[in-house]
């Protein structure tokens, strides 16, 4: 018992030493020149920005282009780093939970606010993974966009049919937005939340064909009720990049 207690003390001490945490209260970020989320959002497109936040997800490393995209979050909001040019070694150093400093240019596309031309620096010593924020009740309100790029959950959504031109078949999802793709491409699916229908996506660069999220949507049926977890990406409205699906 004494040995077990001593081991637990050591493990607990290591956790405290590395600053690891999970939940709704991230470790305080102290990075010189860092913009708060409010200051970042207030910047105009094409202005230089410096932020620091915790990595909540990362897309695959695109060897052909030498880049990747990152999903970040801090105590105030979420950030999307678009096509960060990096080496495989630099990519591998960025772990989910890592605190990173990002220098780049703010831009936006179809409502999605993001950072381009980024330089990313890992800051050792602190890590944090956010709990999913329930934004179900915010759909259809102006407040939803304030949670853009955060890790969220939408509860009790209903899978509704996706259709193709001149095709009466009701599909639970499509490979690519227009159904022209194959397995391994992005999965698009429609859900009803309240009285409105939205299109969500399993971004294959984020959750590939072997992921649980991808397989869950492939196995879904029209009429299924699901809880959907993911990053609240924006494309002319909410289009979460799905990372987990729980059938009710």
Image (cartoon, helix red, strand yellow):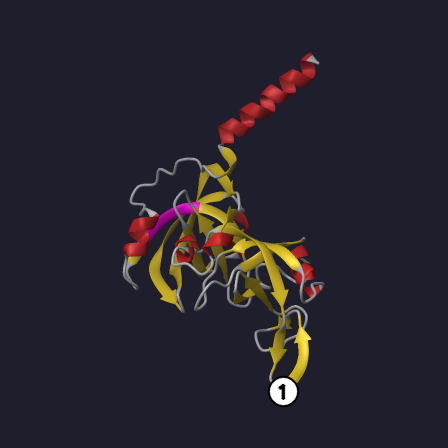
Disc 1 marks which residue?
Answer: 166
What residue is at 48 percent from the left and 53 percent from the top? 137
20 or 123, which is in the foreground? Answer: 20
Left or right placement of residue 147 versus residue 91 in this view:
left
**Magenta region includes residue 88:** no
> Which residue is situated farthest in the front direction here?
195
Q: Position of residue 204 (x, y in %)?
A: 60, 64
Q: How many marks?
A: 1
Splitting the image into 4 quarters, where does residue 241 fall? bottom right
How many residues crowd mark 1 within 10 Å: few (<14), some (14–19), many (20+)?
few
Residue stretch rendered in magenta on the structure: 49-53
Splitting the image into 4 quarters, where does residue 208 fall? bottom right
145 or 224, which is in the foreground? Answer: 224
Q: Main secondary structure of the magenta part?
A: strand
What residue is at 40 percent from the left and 69 percent from the top? 110
Tell me if I can see residue 205 in this picture. yes
Q: Position of residue 168 (x, y in %)?
A: 67, 82
- Quadrant of the image for the N terminus? top right
Left or right placement of residue 49 versus residue 26 in this view:
left
220 or 35, which is in the foreground? Answer: 220
Judged from the image, the secondary structure of the residue bearing numbered disc 1 is: loop
Q: Position of residue 119 (x, y in %)?
A: 39, 54
What residue is at 35 percent from the left and 63 percent from the top? 107
> Which residue is situated farthest in the bottom direction here?
166
Left or right placement of residue 241 versus residue 77 in this view:
right
231 or 15, which is in the foreground? Answer: 231
Q: Position of residue 42 (x, y in %)?
A: 28, 55
**Residue 126 against residue 101 in the figure, above or below:** above
Left or right placement of residue 139 versus residue 155 in this view:
left
What residue is at 29 percent from the left and 50 percent from the top? 39
Tell me if I can see residue 179 in this picture. no
């Amino acid at each position: 018992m004494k040995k077990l207690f001593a081991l637990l003390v050591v493990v607990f001490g290591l956790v405290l030493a590395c600053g690891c945490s999970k939940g709704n209260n991230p470790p305080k970020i102290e990075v010189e020149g860092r913009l708060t989320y409010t200051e970042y959002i207030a910047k105009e497109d094409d202005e230089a920005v410096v932020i620091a936040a915790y990595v909540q997800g990362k897309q695959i490393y695109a060897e052909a282009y030498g880049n990747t995209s990152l999903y970040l979050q801090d105590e105030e909001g979420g950030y999307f780093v678009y096509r960060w040019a990096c080496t495989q070694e630099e990519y591998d150093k960025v772990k989910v939970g890592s605190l990173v400093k990002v220098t780049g240019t703010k831009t936006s596309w179809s409502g999605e606010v993001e950072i381009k031309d980024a330089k990313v620096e890992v800051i050792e010593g602190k890590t944090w993974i956010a709990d999913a924020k329930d934004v179900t009740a915010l759909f259809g309100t102006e407040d939803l966009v304030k949670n853009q790029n955060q890790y969220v959950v939408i509860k009790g959504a209903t899978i509704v049919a996706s259709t193709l031109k001149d095709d009466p078949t009701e599909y639970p999802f499509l490979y690519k937005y227009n159904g022209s793709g194959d397995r391994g491409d992005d999965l698009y699916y429609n859900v009803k939340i309240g009285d409105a229908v939205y299109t969500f996506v399993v971004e294959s660069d984020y959750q590939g064909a072997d992921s649980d999220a991808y397989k869950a949507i492939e196995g879904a049926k029209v009429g299924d009720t699901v809880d959907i977890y993911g990053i609240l990406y924006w494309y002319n409205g909410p289009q979460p990049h799905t990372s987990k699906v729980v059938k009710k």
